[in-house]
Every structure is written in C-alpha cells, then in structure tokens.
Amino acid sequence: MREARWTIEQLRGELELLGSQGLSTEDYFAEISPRLRRVVDNDAACWHTMDPHTLLLTSDAPTELVSNGIFTEENVNAAGELMIRSEYLIEDSNTFASLASGPRQVATLETATGGNPESSTRYREMSAPSGIPHELRAVFLVRGRAWGAVHIARREGSGAFDSKDEAALAAVTGTIAQGIRSSLRFEAARRASGLESPGLVMLGSNNEVEFISAPARELLADLRGNQPAAEGDLPQSILSLANFIRASGVSETFPKSSVTVPGTTGWFVLHASREDRDGKVAVVIEPATGPRSATLRLEAHGVTPREREIATLIARGYGNAEIAEELVLSPHTVQDYVKNIFEKLGVNSRREMVASVFMDEYLPEVMVSTPLTTHGRFEVEPGE
C-alpha cells in the first residue's frame, strides 16, 4: 500500500526533528529519504556532504541506488567514478557546484538543459543506460555556504520531475542544510580514536600538562618525529602557540588561533583557545585535510595568496569572467594569474589543476576502491 502523502509543513517538521537528534550523516540521510518520498516521488536518492569552502564533495551515500536495484555492489563504484568526472573533470550540466553558486539551488536536468537532457554526458553515460533518466538535484546552503547535496532519480517510465517537485524540494533545502551541518558537528565530537581523529591537550598557566586525550598521544608522537622526549614533553609548536594565545590579551571573548605545522606523516592543524582568565589553554590537534592541505599544496608550489583565491574559484566552477567580477579584476589580469598557476603546478588545464590539488582528499568513499583514471570518453583533454 502506498504511504499517505505529506504536506510541506509536515515534511519540514519531521526534518527539523531529525536534525536535532545528533544522528550520523549516514543515518540522517537514510532517515531523510523515505520522508522526502512522501512529498516527492522518486526511486532512489544519493546524498552527499560538501566542503563549503571549495564546493567539493566529501562523502556520498549511494545505499538506495544499490538496495533499490538500480546498481549492484559490483558496478556502483564505476557509476560513482562517472558521476565524479561529470562534476569536476568534464563540462556538464546541473552540477552541484553550479547549483551552489547559481541563483537557484534546486533543478531538474530537463530544466538545466533547456529540455535537452541528452546534451549531458552524465545522462548519456550513466543515467540513461542505468534506467534512471530523470534527475532532480539540490544543494543545501546555510548562509550561502554549501554543506551537502542530493541526486534524486526516477526510473524510465516513472515520468520526469516537474516544477512542483522542484518547488517542494526547494522549500526544505534550508532545513536539510541545518541537519547536515549538525550531523557533521556531532560526528566530529564522537571521534574517539585513530590518527585521523582530533586530539586534545589541556595546559595550565605555566604550560604544565593537565590532560592529554588518547588520540592526542599518537598525534604528538607524529609531531615530535624522531626527536627524543620525556613523558609529558610537548613539541615546541604547541608551546609556542599556547604562549601566543596568553600574550594576546584578555577579552570578553577569549582569543582563538590556529596554525598548520609539519609532522612525520604530513601536516597538522593546531587549534588553540584560552579557556579562562588564569591562562589555561586548550589545544586541539588534527591532520590537515581538505582546504588546509589543498592550501599547503598550492603554497608548496610557490602559488601566491591571490593565485590561491583564483585556484579555489576555479575549483568552484567559475570561469575567467566570473572570477574577474568576483575579485574586481580585469579578465586579462585573471588570465595572467591562471597561466601562472598552471605553470607553477605543471598542469595544462583547469580540470588537471582541480584533480591534482583538490580531488584526492575530496573523492567520496565510493571512489576509494576505484582510483580516478582517464579512459574512454572521460579522458581529460589539454587546455581549458
């Protein structure tokens, strides 16, 4: 029996309740899908988290695509690779980045292509052959920053999505965005072990160690490298940051600061804050992933701060004219900057730059077992 339809108000109320429960993103997405289906008919949805700085995907949840028989465990990875290529390595329509930076955050592929979905590579190579030609997409923004996205599919014969479906999804994008952001925050707080988990060090007013969490001990060992240290000795980077925080003065809003420092296995970010007026300092240590490590890659190649801005806008899908408008520069100046970036990074195109600088830490988990390679129609061509 078909479940009863909901109003938009009912759906929004359910989503607000879900967002307050501290679910993991995986569980949150799994709970959203059947509720959304009460308003927008569909056969499957693939949910993603996004980095709000670069608009690159940081995870995906393709469970429904497999459980509903659209893909199998054997071919879902290949489908994920095609989707990633359509987002970042080839020109395509209705990409998440274009929705995030455009005037509307929800669109069907039919709307985005002016009624010609066959012009989309993603449609020709993935959606149509897989029997899900109808696509509705959305990105979820909080104060203009994207925290997630969704690709909603209908099978052939189910009928295309229409403007009513677009409007219904658009009415709850803000609520879903808040829920995704809350889930990410709760997930970060639940991390408890492993080198990839944040560590916490509490220091007294004279840098005496009051507390070191278990993950912090592993991270501290990585920061020390081969330098011998007695129990409780801390790397100079942490002591220097703690002293800087104390010297920054007392205010009603306790100062905070963060720095990026090298370790044995890579770069790490130290976040420090003064916890009270007596000089106690908390330092959080975590591996430098995402935008931090992308910035470090660019800096390592001698890319200037202005060039880093332009590289990030390129990753967001901006063209030269859009970059010129955003940064109040002439198109000729932007072109010179882009040329310099390519020369410093040793690449020949925007797609190569995005792949080499940003992609390896933003590929969704589905891509881990299917390395990004060029083949067939998805080969990256030289030039822009």
Image: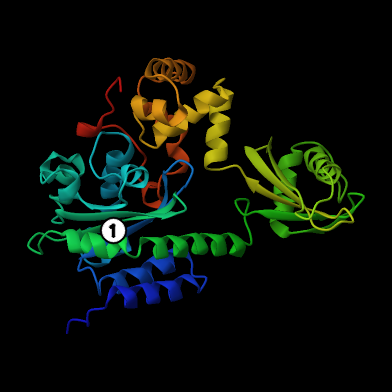
Q: Quadrant of the N terminus?
A: bottom left
The quadrant holding residue 191 is: bottom right
Pick whichever, 259 or 228, lies toward us: 259
Residue 66 appears in the figure: no
* Residue 82 in the image: above or below residue 303: below
Residue at coordinates 63% horizontally, 59% vertically from top-left? Answer: 193
**Residue in the foreground of this view, choosing between 15 and 208:** 15
| Residue 194 pos. (x, y %) | 62, 55
**Looking at this view, is 181 or 76 the one in front?**
181
Report the colour scheme.
rainbow
Residue 22, horizontal then vertical, whole percent = 52, 70
Percent of width and height locating residue 166: 23, 59
Task: Answer whether residue 7 is visible to the viewer in this image.
Answer: yes
Q: Is residue 187 above or below residue 351?
A: below
Determine whether, in the image, residue 285 is placed left or right of residue 98. right
Task: Point out the residue furthest to the left here.
Answer: 157
Q: Where does the image place residue 324, in percent across and percent down from the top left? A: 40, 25
The amino acid at mark 1 is Glu
Left/right of residue 97 with respect to residue 232 in the rendered view? left
| Quadrant of res 156 | bottom left
Extreme residue toward the right, this view = 206
For mark 1, what is the residue?
Answer: 73
Image quadrant holding the C terminus, namely: top left
Q: Residue at x 78, y 55 (%)?
A: 252
